Amino acid sequence: MPRKKTPATTGTKTVENPVTGLLKVDNAERFWTGINDLVFPRYERLGYDGLSTPEQVAHCIDWLVREVEAGGLRQFLREISGDHTAETLTALRAIGADHTAEMMELAITVFPEEVPVDQDERLAIMEDFTGRERRVLKDFDAGFFDNSEDLLKLLKAYMAKRVTEFHPE
């Protein structure tokens, strides 16, 4: 019986899906950088709506982690990431980060209604925040850093079930 040819015997290389490789990364900084490198180019080219649902989830969680670590929820809301506050709450629920979602829902009650999608409108409201509103945002930050939910681990588990729904460039 003839031997079946495999990539090794034909001289072609098997290329690992970048998502699969990213799921093996243990270093948090490298993982978050990898998420950004995986999804952000498509976001820049196609916009948020051009991403698949799992790409949107990864993008929102990455933005939340990066902005909160850099300057708290206030920074997340001040930046373009705040345009996707509602989607970020959905993303947190999608990966099973219910406690973080609840903390964020409580924190964004500092806005008179929903968090404005328009950055300028959001910034205008935030300019008028009193000490009470600022404390609410700082309380989120404290809870975020003390929180036992491991967003990296939760996102990896979510992504592992949806590897084929990511579209690496």
Image (cartoon, rainbow, N blue to C red):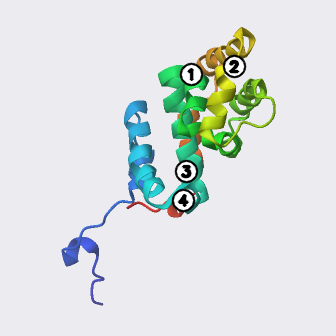
- Front disc: 3 or 2: 2
Q: Which of the image's four quarters has the N terminus?
A: bottom left
Badge 2 marks a residue whose secondary structure is loop
User: Is residue 75 depicted above or below 84 in this figure?
Assistant: above
Q: Earlier in the sequence, mark 3 or mark 2?
A: 2
Specify whether 159 is left or right of 102. left
Q: Which residue is mark 4?
A: 51
User: Is residue 144 depicted above or below 44 in this figure?
Assistant: above
Specify the amino acid type for callout 1: Gly
- Front disc: 4 or 2: 2
Q: Residues within 10 Å of mark 2 (few under 14, many from 20)?
A: few
Q: Label 3, label 1: how many angstroms apart (C-alpha)?
A: 25 Å
- Front disc: 3 or 4: 4
Q: Label 4 near label 1: C-beta < 8 Å?
A: no
State the mark number for residue 10.
none
State the mark number for residue 159.
3
Percent x, y of residue 158: 60, 48
- The residue at the point 40 percent across, 54 percent down is 41
Q: Which residue is mark 1?
A: 72
Badge 3 marks a residue whose secondary structure is helix
Task: Check the image and name the residue furthest to the left.
Answer: 11
